[in-house]
Image: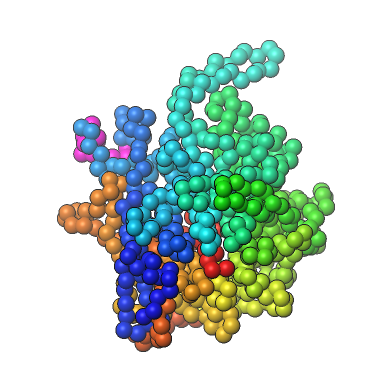
Amino acid sequence: MKLSPISLALLPLLTVFTAQAAVYQIVELDTTTKVRSTSGVAATPQGEVILNGSTLLDFEIDLDEIDFESEIILALFTDEQIEEINNGIFSSTVKSTLINYLSSQAFVTIQPVGSTRVIRQTQNSGQSQVVLRDTQQTKNNSEFAYAVNNSGYIAGIATAPSFKSTFTPTAAPVAEGEDPVEPANPYTAWIPEAGYLFGYVVNGQQSTALPPQFSSYGGGMSAALDINNNNLVAGFTSTGITTTTQETIDSICTGFSQPLQFCLNQVLSARSVNVLSLLSKVRLYGTVDTYTEGYEERAALWQYSPEGTAVLNRTWGFLGEKGTGLAATTSEDYTVPVYYSRANAVNDSGIAVGSSLYSDTSRVTTFLDGFGGEFRIIYSAPHATIFNGDSVTGFIDTEEWVGSVATDINNQNLIAGYALKNINSSVRSRFFTYDMNTQTLRFPEGFFSSSGTEPLDMNNQGQVVGRAEVIVGGTTSRRINAFLYDNASNTFTNLNSLVGCDAPYTLVEASSINDDGVITATALINRVVYGYNGEPVLDENGDVFESEQATTVLLQPIANGQVEDCNAEENTYERNAGSLSALWLMLLGTLPLLRRRSRARLNR
């Protein structure tokens, strides 16, 4: 078998699973005891593999700030565990319980816990963390990679790390004639940096933040979702905040009883645009029914320089009212939507694609308010958007499709994405491709007519990878599997059918494909579970415990490979309806404001 230069460079890092007959060879990355599970971003031309890891197993608990005599903490443990704690013994189970407790508490007095980090696996030095923002190694923020270009530059996002400090409350002003309120005593607080979310580009050990357009209130925000081979970074940024919104937040965040920056980060993050949430509302109601408003968020491009600078190149507007780029006219009959735009990908010509809010005041839905009254909502929803030069345009029929998102564009101006439509009495995601050159829109047939399908990445040959629902062997429970679509031949294939039948994996998501056809995917496999002490977890019999976990694999094309003839029953996908599985819902998103989309820009 002849491997590409990338493949040859990676072989020393990988465990290889071959088959007598298959189209792809699976290569598994070295396992890590620093995170519970991984998902792939890309294999770079420099011979590295970039991963996202979740559930940090090396998180260090600040035991000095936990009151082990409080009823809340004592209720978490057995008498035996409490005795161990009193003797200074903290087992993996105890640590896990404490970390789960900390993670569930969003209070300034509780130590925050990070959920994701970026990992680089190199040929010679194994795995190491890629630091975007957490230079002090607090491990209490979350960092996530989205794309890598041919130079190996990584684009991603990072939330604000927090630092332990003593906060002294001050007395709030009172109205004339009222008695002043005595402020609370000083207390230990975890105070975050300004800017609840920033985009970053990482070059080797150098990390560069993307400057927001608007940063004078709360620090602003930015996000990096893609980077092309000319080092243009696509994403979105804060461009302002309305006076009304600022006044509302000022009434909440006074700085008297808790640190001002903690409150600003918490409130602005909660009010940020969550595209997944908007699409969920569209699935339920056929429109976005409620809005939250924090920063004004707009699609953006930055120019990154390898010397370590990033300059905001431009921002774009939104589709708006009936695609005019304008907001709906203010009226007492309805609430004007909160508009946004977001660039998910950019090709080497600088054409970006993503989504923005579309509205139509002529399409009105009446809702009951629960108190016998009625209120009217105009149609609004995220829709796939092209950002090209000064133009912001859509291409999806908003009458037929209730929502849509463009996820990628290649150098041939072929766009991939998905759109929502009521199919068999349920709103499903349908995968599409759109050729800008010929203005041809195609909805390829998935595994079955009502299969929810989302593309995540595309190469310059028009090969698209992603995830789609399947129903296996006569059941009604839906699961997700990774797919490969070839635009030239209009063929849609389950990637699990292209690897050896004896492969010990289920490929649930394909997150990137380069021009050599090498695919980065996420697979489920039964393997040893590691605890928060870095040691294998043991069951009640003292045996090593195994469970199904997500891990990153590469799929290497096999020269002249052919599909192996596996058991026909195992590869039969019934064409009947069923409910979404918990796994499908889990993989729809791991961060609150961004859809789960690990993708790479290689050989473009």
- Residue situated in front as seen by the camera: 536 or 250: 536
Viewer-side residue, 77 vs 453: 453
Q: Residue 194: give x, y in percent of width and height.
A: 57, 36
Q: Which residue is found at the position 65% from the left and 18% from the top?
A: 174
Q: Is residue 235 left or right of residue 58?
A: right
Q: Which corner quadrant of the image does residue 355 belong to?
A: bottom right
Quadrant location of the C terminus in the rendered image: bottom right
Q: Identify the residue shown where x is 61% and y is 70%.
A: 410
Q: Nearer the viewer, residue 329 or 179?
A: 329
Camera sees residue 460: yes
Q: Is residue 270 rendered magenta in the image?
A: no
What predominant SS class does the magenta segment belong to?
Answer: helix
Q: Nearer the viewer, residue 426 or 307?
A: 307
Displayed quadrant of residue 421: bottom right
Residue depicted at x 58% and y 30%: 260
Q: Can residue 427 be seen in this snapshot?
A: no
Q: What is the image's colouring? A: rainbow
Q: Position of residue 324 (x, y in %)?
A: 81, 60
